[in-house]
Image: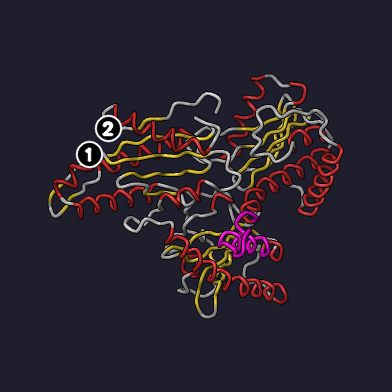
Amino acid sequence: MINTLVWFAAGAALGAFLVQRRRQGASGLTLPGADAALLPDPALGWLAGARGALGVWVSHPVTDHDAPLRWSRVVPGERLSAAMVGDIEQRLTGCHREGSSGGTRLDSGTLLHASAGGLTAAVLLPTGAPADALQAASADLVALLDGLGRKPMLERAIEEGEGPTESLGSIGLRLAYQLERVLHSEVIVTAVVESQVRVIGTSGRADRRLLDAVADPGSALARVARGEDQPLTTITDPLGGVVPDRRIHVAPAIVLPIKSGDEAVGSVACWTGEEGMPIGGVIAEVQEALRNAGPRIARSRKLEELGQAASADPLTGLKNRRGLDDAMRRVGLTQGTLVYADFDKFKILNDTLGHHAGDAALVHFARIVHDQIRGGDTAARIGGEEFAIWLPGAPLVYGAKVADRIRVLLGTTTWDWQGRSWPLSISAGVAAVPDTTRSIENLAVLADAALAKAKQMGRNRIEVATPTAGG
């Protein structure tokens, strides 16, 4: 393995190289299969040109673990056949699932690969490449993954930090990066939000899929965040396994509280590589950062709760239409799925059992939806018995799968009112960017049309929107 100092030096060299190339302008390199939202600049093409590579790959972020892994790639001069590319991507998919890093000698060359933060990158160098070239290319992969891992979180911190007040997300992300700089370690930051302990920040070395995840109530991070435990170390997952992480942490996690005065408002977990707490000036700097963040988290949480009251449905606790619109207007989103769901024959339920029963049925459905979506998703009640679910970053197939799972659960879960059983069902329409339209603004119309089709086709079913011509 290449030592850490060499990797950091190579990463800095790559950064300088990219800046120089950006000033000189593009050299005509193309990105076959590249996703512009994933790659902020032609980093793959530059890496291939700098190292004389036969090919460079990076995986797309995973939103549905059952879906096949997708790759962006650059194959300069098309020197690899389709069969070779397919074989390499099959190998890399296995490496991605294992979260491994290393190298493999193939007939076509030497394949180097690295995994971090839920992403995998790889470069294929010609057979006989010298050791220093292998070492430099390995460092480039680490730098590429580090940049891709940080980009969405830094964009979010900038976006959420705009305006007169800080958001919980911007505070959490900035604290995570500050502690990473001090401790040279992976960092996770949580805050107590209502009755949950939510991840509000992850450093560049941490798994960014954890952002917005809710900690298990009995986990170390949750206990410390609620003030039930003092600072502690743990060898188990401090979040309680809410997101599978295939990486192995050799050292225990150190979990520290974040306080505003005497009130516990959150917690942080970090892996320093040591068996115990940091000492001396390092722990003093950490404690100062936590003291500074605590009152800001408390203040932002109060403002967030006030804002949520204005954008929440008082009956179900889900977002209202305003809250849904706010979630869908997040800057930089290029992929997402919108589900519109509507109760079947809801008027008959109201007329037969009364409006209180109807309200109870809506609350019952809202709980099912809440339990079936991810931490960063948004569920809203946008009409009397009409609901919407926004799944940012999710492809159409994932959204349709979630909608159908919710439909099946509602139909198979026993519900009764004052001892009288009543069957419940929904119809739903699903639309997605970019699968059915290029514009997020068109999703509501398309999802509503698909919902209407589901009603016309007999109810208790899911319909997918028809792609629009030209966007």
Range of magenta residues: 158-179
Q: Quadrant of residue 289?
A: bottom right
**Residue highlighted by disc 2:** 459
Residue matched to label 1: 345
Query: Which corner quadrant holds the C terminus?
Result: top right
- Tell which of 270 and 19 is nearer to you: 19
Name the element at disc 1. loop
Q: Earlier in the sequence, mark 1 or mark 2?
A: 1
Measured in 3D between alpha carbons, the distance from the residue under mark 1 to the one under mark 2, in whole angstroms, is 9 Å
Residue 161 belongs to the span the image colors magenta:
yes
- Between residue 428 and residue 13, name the one nearer to us: 428
Q: Amino acid at mark 1?
A: Lys
Where residue 354 appears, x then y in whole percent?
A: 16, 51
351 up-or-down from 306: above or below: above
Using the rendered image of the protein, determine whether residue 270 is visible from the camera's viewpoint. Answer: no
Mark 1 vs 2: CB contact within 8 A = yes
The residue at the point 71 percent across, 77 percent down is 280
Pinpoint residue 464: horizontal percent, then vertical percent.
41, 30
Q: Residue at coordinates 49% horizontally, 60% vertically from top-left?
A: 198
Q: Is residue 59 left or right of residue 44?
A: left
Mark 2 element type = loop
Tell me which corner region of the image, top left, top right, bottom left or bottom right, holds residue 105.
top right
Is residue 79 on the magenta stretch? no
Q: Residue at x 73, y 39 (%)?
A: 41
**Which residue appears farthest toward the bottom when viewing the image?**
262
Q: Main secondary structure of the magenta part?
A: helix
Q: Is residue 165 above or below residue 114?
A: below
Which mark is in front, 1 or 2?
Answer: 1
Q: Position of residue 272 (x, y in %)?
A: 65, 63
